[in-house]
Amino acid sequence: MNGVDGGPFHAGELRAQMLAGAGSAGGAIRDAMPEQHRDFFAGLRYLALATLDPDGWPVATMLAGPAGFIASPDARRLELAVPVERADPALHALHKGSPVGLLGIDFSNRRRNRANGLAAAVHAGGLHIDVRESFGNCPKYIHVREVESGSANASAPAEHFIGLDEGARALLAVAETFFVASSAGNTGGAGGVDISHRGGPAGFVQVNGATLTIPDYSGNRYFNTLGNLLLEPRSALLFIDFASGDLLHLQGRAEILWQQPQGRSLPAAERSWHFHVQGGWRRRAALPLRWNRRNPA
């Protein structure tokens, strides 16, 4: 970790904490994974990943494999035995030395843990991550789902689009889960790339033209994502169609609204942010897994 004055937070995160009126000491942020996190990753069947494209824009995807496809030989290393599909635009530029943000999440029990670092090796059969930052997240806003089936069907080529197409709008209208990839930008090595989970009631992401309004609910007070967005507004959102295995990836620029207007449009939100969509892509049946929805979070 390489934050301000040796602490866990970079300047953007500290600024976000100040603007929000409260922050955290970040005591749970470590430079290595505790044993329970290593065991957690080893039992996962899917994992969200963020890195940067050749233009420095955050990109995100989800990887999936059988339980055990993630191994942790030691507290500072994760090894992913999963094909690095160059047909996935989010992985096209991934190489040794790329910054990587990982979010391990288990929808069945609402556990999630983060690991950020650098790609130590990238090859056709997988990748190795040198972990530089590790911390857990609370189970808030995670909707409980169980993996109900798998499919061996190969995903179709990525379908690129500008703005929001009708298929994207249809998924956003019912989405209750997404992931946001962000970067600290050029901060001399501090911060790197991060991917985090966002959840809410179906349709909690509001769409107005090509602009999304996203509520920001109370969390761990680290403000990793909003702190990154203060330094680098370019970001990416990843949505999953849990019934089909489709992945929807949106790229755009974020604008944080620190003073949340009073009203009913975003109940319980402490603030909100706009995401101005520039375009994205869709990968049909990209995931071999399908989920059912069990009960509200």
Image (cartoon, rainbow, N blue to C red):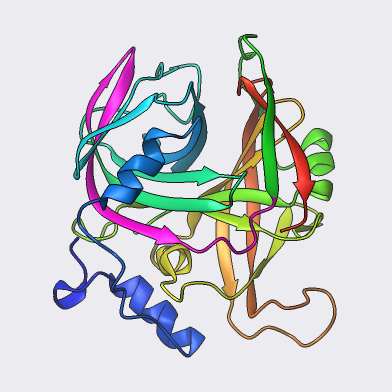
Quarter placement of the C terminus: bottom right
User: What residue is drawn where x is 59% and y is 49%?
Assistant: 109
Nearest the camera: 89 or 55? 89
Nearest the camera: 256 or 225? 225
Above-or-below relation of 176 to 26: above
Disc count in the image?
Answer: 0
The image quarter in which residue 8 lies: bottom left
- Residue 180: give x, y in percent of width and height: 54, 51
Range drawn in magenta: 120-143
* Residue 216 can be seen in this image: yes
The image quarter in which residue 282 lies: top right
Above-or-below relation of 159 to 49: above
Side of 106 relative to 171 (left or right): left
The image quarter in which residue 83 lies: top left
User: What residue is drawn where x is 44% and y is 46%?
Assistant: 103
Q: Residue furthest top?
A: 153
Side of 23 relative to 210 (left or right): left
Indicate whether residue 136 is drawn in magenta. Answer: yes
Above-or-below relation of 28 to 264: above
* Residue 185 can be seen in this image: no
- Residue 6: give x, y in percent of width and height: 14, 72
Q: Which SS type dominates the magenta stretch?
A: strand
Indicate whether residue 13 is drawn in magenta. Answer: no
Q: Residue furthest left?
A: 6
User: What residue is drawn where x is 40% and y is 36%?
Assistant: 53
Side of 9 relative to 201 (left or right): left
Quarter placement of the N terminus: bottom left
- Residue 155: give x, y in percent of width and height: 62, 14
Nearest the camera: 74 or 170? 74
- Residue 266: give x, y in percent of width and height: 77, 74
